[in-house]
Amino acid sequence: MNKNDLISFAADYFPMFLRKPAPKYVSEAGNRVHGIVAEFNETPKVFHAAEMVRDAGYSNWDVHSPFPIHDIETAMGFKPTKLPMMAGAAAITGVSIGALLQWGTSYFLYPMVVQGKPYEAWEPFVPIMFELGILLTAFMCIFGMLALNGLPRFHHPLFSHDRFYKVSDDRFIICIESNDPKFDPSATRALLEKAGGKEIALIEDED
Amino acid sequence: MSQIAANHPAPDSTALSDAQWAHRLEAIANDARMHDDNINLPASAAAKIGRPMLIVGLVGLVVSAVGAVSVSLEHALAGIEIGLFTVLAISLGSLFWTMVFHALNAGWSITLRRQFENVASLVWIPAICLVLIAILEVLADGILLTWLDPTVSNHLLDIKAPYLNGPFFITRVIIYAICWIVLSRLLLGWSRKSDETGDRTLGRKARFWSSFGIPVFAFSVTFCAFDFLMSLDYRFFSTMWGVYFFASCALGSASAIAIIAAMLKASGRLQGIVTTEHFHDLGKLVFAFVVFWTYVTFSQYFLIWYSNIPEETLWFTARRAMGFDWLFKVMMFGHFVVPFLILIWRPIKKSPKLLSIVSGYLIIMIALDMAWIILPMVSVGNADSASPSVPGHLINAASVLGVIMIFGWLICGKITKSPLIPTKDPMLHESLSHKNYV
């Protein structure tokens, strides 16, 4: 995610503090261009089209489908997600906090005999360390997943495209976004046409 | 009406029609991966690994026998029991996994299931050995099991006498042995029979009996662990004990199968049949049961530590006082922290070589876990060998190695007796095209 994307992302949530960066492409109506969509009506077609878009080197694009398509992640060239690493970091943080808060307070700051147990006993700390580790990991899994997906959000430019609602019925849609470094209005449209896409349309962001 | 009948087959009919089944059999027969070289292991190839194991095993057992006669019977028997309970855990765990796969109608594990069945069907060896050990213990008035000694008089023992007495002990061990042997023989038998006849109803039969076999397994494993391991110290009791031993069973079995499958892959068999996806799932099971073992073991220790009741804490304090505290630390770090941090990485679970190395390490850890349970009790019974001695340790190590290696040799022989996978399982195609979409 580069700087402009970050500003644009934050501006979605805090329009009072941040202004979106100037758009790279503007439609004839003067609106910001979100991207180009193409429709497909069969799973194999959208699968092969996804492979073509992947091989053309696009990175900021998506396939929308009414149902999960097995192996579409290889056809789209997904990289492994960073979420496990983030969850691991959260787990280490949680376990460390649990250890420090208990061991630090009851061994260093305010040594106190509880039930005649020795100060240096590690056993009573384990459940708290475990629980805190699990808690932070679960939080990171949920909120990290939402953040990586760019959720929650109030609106998405694709919703302004009436035909987009067909992806919950009987159509597959590929959308290549205009903030992709390789995006070019005519070349991208030509690629989608070559991939067999129908009803190719420009998506405008009305803001 | 005929429409309804077609959509809802009678309860005793099979879900697959004869035509569908013939179609599947044809697809299996035409599959390039199913040629004989790929799914059979000749005895000569197995002997390459089996024979060195047999030699090491025999040397270990001879050292153990010499030690039993010349140094101490207790140490030799303790070593044999440590080894026996390790291999019993591996084979009982395989029986458990086979029954779980049947009961849950699991698809992914079909190509691995024959190895689980092979190892499970070897349960008769540790089971018969346990019966012999039980008889030996009773005849010798308690070698490791001090409660068999008639000179020990104790109010606690008087109360426990209806359960802890020689004849009932032997009867129980024989019942466990019968349960395990019958279950494992039946499951392997049906699986082999379906290879020959292609009878698809045998899977249904196995599923039916597995569902009853799982509770039988649960009770027999729990009480066997009570009888041989917990009663080493008749004063101690823990309701978690059966689960503690079961955790080693499930872990040991998944580890052993990972090693066997990796070796079969390395010898050029099961190419395209057992893939990284299967190893990934097996690795997940190993990982899960490393954590499960820790959960059970720590819960047991934690509750005993916190409640601080002398009749329970003595189990741990005695071990620490007798110089076995290092084994406690080895268990904590070696059986949990290290394998947890290694197995959490996906590439390690997916690699046959790395997973089998970790699995071998975990089997050593299971043996050390059994040593932590059994070994300290050697010194309790007889005051003359109060502290662990070097010859004693040597005998222990030789006996453990002997038993495990002999068991490895037996597995090598068993694998060659039938195809490496159930060749005509109705769901074989599911396992052949198994993929984790993650």
Image (spheres, coloured by chain):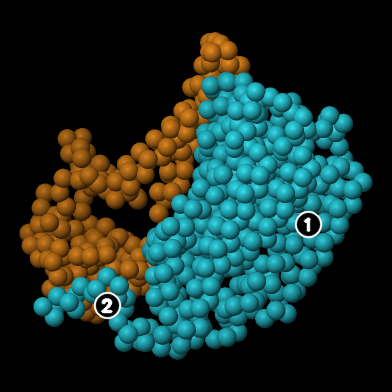
Q: Is residue A160 visible?
A: yes
Q: Which residue occupies 78% across, 66% down?
A: B54
Q: Quadrant of residue A41?
A: bottom left
Q: Residue B2, position in %: x, y?
A: 13, 80
Colour used to depict chain B in the structure image: cyan
Position above or below: B348 against A84: below
Q: Residue B287, position in %: x, y?
A: 53, 51
Position above or below: B224 against A100: below
Q: Is residue B326 visible?
A: no
Q: Quadrant of residue B263?
A: bottom right
At mark 1, the secondary structure is helix
Residue with the mark numbered 2: A44
Nearer to us in this view, A153 or B101: B101
Separation of marks 2 and 1 at Cα, in angstroms:
58 Å
Q: For the residue marked with disc 1, what is the amino acid?
A: Gly
Residue with the mark numbered 1: B402
Number of other residues with Cα within 10 Å of mark 2, as a class: few under 14, some 14 to 19, many 20 or more: few
Q: How many marks?
A: 2
